[in-house]
Image (cartoon, rainbow, N blue to C red):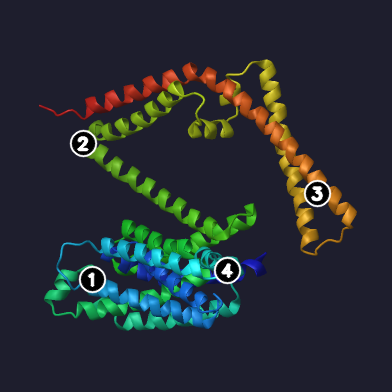
Amino acid sequence: MLDLLAVPFLACLVLTGIHVYLGLHVLARGVIFVDLALAQIAALGISVAVLAGHPIQSDPAYWYALAFTIGGAAVFALSRLHAAPVPAEAVIGIVYAVSAAVAVLVVDRAPQGSEHIKQLLVGSILTVTPREVATVALLYAALGVIHWLIRRPLLDISLDPAGARARGRAVAVWDFVFYTSFGLVVTSSVRLAGVLLVFSYLIIPAVVGALLARGVLSRLVIGWSLGLIASAFGILAAWTWDLPTGAAIVTTFGVILAAVAIVLGVVVLRRRVLEHGVRALAGVLITSGAVIALAGGSLLAFPAMDQPWLAAVEHAVPGAALAFLDHEEREEYAESREGVAEGEAELARVTQMRDDVQWGRRVMSADMQERLRQYIAGRQEMVTGDRLVLRALRQKARQRQRYGLGLPLTFCGLGAIGAGLWLGRPRS
């Protein structure tokens, strides 16, 4: 396990090192989606390279992508020269949309071009090689040294652009340097890990650092720590539950960001309660009451509609559904639930056996392989049948929950809204 995951983990650490720093600049400049735009420009460059007959992972394709990305960097730098009231995000969105449209036109003429671009944008952190990680690490280390040497003008322009202009900084020149180096990082990182993972490493640690600290160094330390933790837990989760590695890491980032936001929200709410008393809870009561009333009202009005919140509650606490079923229905529910669990476990076992045969890790005759295929198909039908039974029983429970659960929730939500409005009313 460690041998398999060591190289991807090192790749994640390399991404963390450079992207957290660049993310601080991106967040300060308010150009949050600039990496997506540059990644799309890089994809356009690779599309042109594929159309010219170069493989997607070849050196010529990389240089095509880098050349296009530097052109995009020049566009972003020049867009800051004008004083017109056009937000930077508008320019970024236009560049993204136009480059995506041109890429579609190019891909339409390239053989299997769409598959190549999909491979580029999705990425696969698990398949990186030690040589690729070492090459990117050396490149990012060199860029890190360069950014350290020119950190003062870049931080000055990112954190105080108006003041930088007043102090005579050559904003357009330094912007071009920043966006060019940024584009070089994005072009290299997307080939390594895909757009989604690159965006997460760039933005989420920077956001958490901005939430928890003021100084640049403190934000960097927090961002680097977050990147290390999210990478470790994301890769571990992907290995434990057989999940896509990139998606698992991005989700881990999201969970950590949500946890930080909740903790900070509780701290702020506590301070406001101490300062203003229970009146500070008015907004919480109104918001939570609206959510509860909406949940109860949707169940009351549309019991047959999917109710994700209720399904989640029933999955965690099966008694929430069983309470609305009679004795025979409860026994049938328990048998079907047990059948689904046993069937899924058996399917996982035999599917692993089939995969071992396909990858040469197990030897099996053609006759046994056919029997295994038929057995898997039969098991899948049995599990599907048990799931249909569970679905039918849940629908019965929904009809009974409509009034037994929907009405109380609706009234409780409306009551919470009323209490919040009363607490928040102007004091004479």
Q: CA distance from mark 2 to mark 3?
A: 67 Å
CB contact under 8 Å: marks 4 and 1: no
Q: CA distance from mark 2 to mark 4?
A: 50 Å
Find numbered disc 1 in the image and state the secondary structure of the residue it sits on: helix
Q: Nearer the viewer, residue 13 or 376?
A: 376
The amino acid beneath tag 4 is Pro
Q: Position of residue 32 (x, y in %)?
A: 33, 62
Q: Position of residue 87 (x, y in %)?
A: 22, 61
Question: Who's the residue at 25% across and 70% down the image?
Answer: 158
Find numbered disc 4 in the image and state the secondary structure of the residue it sits on: helix
Question: Dot 4 corresponds to which residue?
Answer: 8
The disc at residue 231 is: none
Local crowd size for mark 2, using a 10 Å CA cut-off: few (<14), some (14–19), many (≥20)? few
Question: Dot 1 corresponds to which residue?
Answer: 79
Q: Which numbered disc, 2 or 3, marks the residue closer to the eye?
A: 3
Question: Dot 3 corresponds to which residue?
Answer: 373
Q: CA distance from mark 1 to mark 3?
A: 60 Å
